[in-house]
């Protein structure tokens, strides 16, 4: 099993293997490696006769193998890519014989997304003898650091706070995050320092009224700021749906509960990893834990569950935008 950086380094050095099996829950890294092979394994003028792309739901192992066994035409190698190879899951054993003796002039790439082969099976072990890569989802608390590093690769200096804001707003969809960073690159100069104002201006996230700031207001018990944000959310409920806000707040207070019962309070790095936050925020969690006791948190989590039911139409006496969230915030802070 190889890691992403090792494979990328090989590819950049012009080393292309006969077989790549790229699997896992995170499609971003699978797509990045595949795209690099597609663009660099052979020259552009060679692709018409030496590059074939299949889709798992529309092909069979027979036709993939028949193509893979062909010799390249007036080129050093040919490229065969099987996208959505997970649709061939029940037929993967048909590739066994080829994997034991692949054609060295073919680069055969399997994109097996949102899952992986059973490592105990023979077919997985055969793929493992070639270039096998498992693309795992990044933990939420690692996303801000990834954003900072990716920004550097795009010649952007993204501040830690901006990275956290992006991760809170966009979640852990790396492809979407990369797309938004591309917008920032177009809108700013190379090497620019990216702060929250740049995020607000170019991506459309309000610097003052977003879920990130709501969480901060709750952690610091800033009643006025919390109510201002909730009022802002209510003015555009489609952009700020109650169910999403409740889900994010549930995660916040669940992390605070984990904080209370952690055995790693003397080790910031281990503590941050355990509760699932960036170390940047530990100071706020430590301060908030003085007010949000385990007993108080248990009540808040109950209130969040009740609010979640209400916004979904269960035992709700109001349809007024923001009413349920406003009541919830009051109960959390009082």
Image (tube, rainbow, N blue to C red):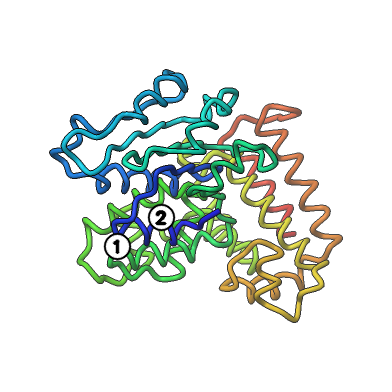
Q: Give the crowd class for mark 1: few <14, some 14-19, many >=20 residues within 10 Å.
A: some
**Horizontal and vertical percent for residue 203?**
34, 52
Q: What element carries label 1?
A: loop
Residue at the spot of label 2: 206
**Horizontal and vertical percent for residue 295?**
86, 60
Q: Is residue 320 visible?
A: yes
Q: Is residue 328 above or below residue 45?
A: below
Q: Is residue 204 above or below residue 164?
A: above
Q: From the viewer's side, name the closer residue of 250 and 209.
A: 250
Residue at the spot of label 1: 154
Residue depicted at x 71% and y 71%: 271
Q: What element carries label 2?
A: loop
Marks 2 and 1, Cα distance to the nearest angstrom?
Answer: 24 Å
Q: From the viewer's side, name the closer residue of 132 and 78.
A: 78
Which residue is the extreme one toward the front? 101
Q: Give the crowd class for mark 2: few <14, some 14-19, many >=20 residues within 10 Å.
A: some
Residue 331 as seen in the image, left or right of residue 145 = right
Residue 41 as seen in the image, left or right of residue 85 = left
Q: Is residue 98 above or below residue 257?
A: above
Residue 223 as seen in the image, left or right of residue 39 = right
**Horizontal and vertical percent for residue 224?**
57, 62
């Amino acid at each position: 099993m190889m890691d992403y950086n090792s494979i990328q380094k090989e590819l950049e050095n012009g080393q292309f293997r006969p077989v790549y099996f790229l699997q896992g829950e995170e499609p971003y890294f699978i797509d990045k490696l595949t795209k690099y092979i597609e663009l660099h394994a052979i020259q552009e003028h060679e692709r018409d006769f030496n590059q074939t792309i299949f889709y798992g739901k529309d092909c069979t192992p027979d036709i993939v193998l028949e193509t893979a066994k062909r010799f390249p035409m007036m080129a050093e190698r040919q490229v065969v890519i099987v996208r959505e190879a997970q649709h061939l899951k029940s037929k993967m054993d048909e590739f066994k014989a080829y994997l034991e003796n692949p054609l060295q002039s073919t680069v055969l790439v399997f994109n097996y997304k949102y899952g992986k082969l059973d490592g105990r099976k023979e077919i997985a072990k055969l793929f493992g003898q070639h270039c096998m890569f498992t693309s795992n989802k990044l933990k939420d608390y690692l996303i801000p650091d990834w954003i900072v590093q990716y920004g550097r690769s795009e010649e952007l200096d993204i501040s830690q706070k901006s990275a956290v804001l992006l991760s809170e707003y966009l979640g852990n969809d790396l492809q979407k995050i990369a797309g938004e960073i591309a917008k920032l690159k177009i809108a700013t100069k190379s090497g620019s320092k990216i702060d929250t104002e740049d995020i607000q201006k170019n991506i459309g996230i309000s610097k003052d009224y977003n879920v990130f700031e709501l969480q901060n207001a709750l952690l610091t018990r800033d009643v006025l700021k919390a109510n201002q944000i909730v009022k802002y959310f209510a003015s555009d409920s489609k952009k700020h749906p109650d169910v999403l806000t409740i889900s994010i707040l549930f995660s916040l207070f669940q992390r605070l509960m984990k904080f209370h019962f952690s055995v790693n309070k003397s080790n910031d790095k281990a503590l941050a990893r355990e509760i699932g936050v960036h170390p940047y925020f530990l100071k706020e969690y430590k301060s908030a834990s003085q007010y949000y006791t385990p007993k108080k948190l248990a009540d808040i989590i109950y209130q969040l569950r009740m609010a979640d039911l209400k916004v979904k139409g269960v035992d709700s006496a109001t349809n007024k935008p923001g009413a349920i969230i406003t009541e919830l915030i009051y109960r959390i802070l009082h």
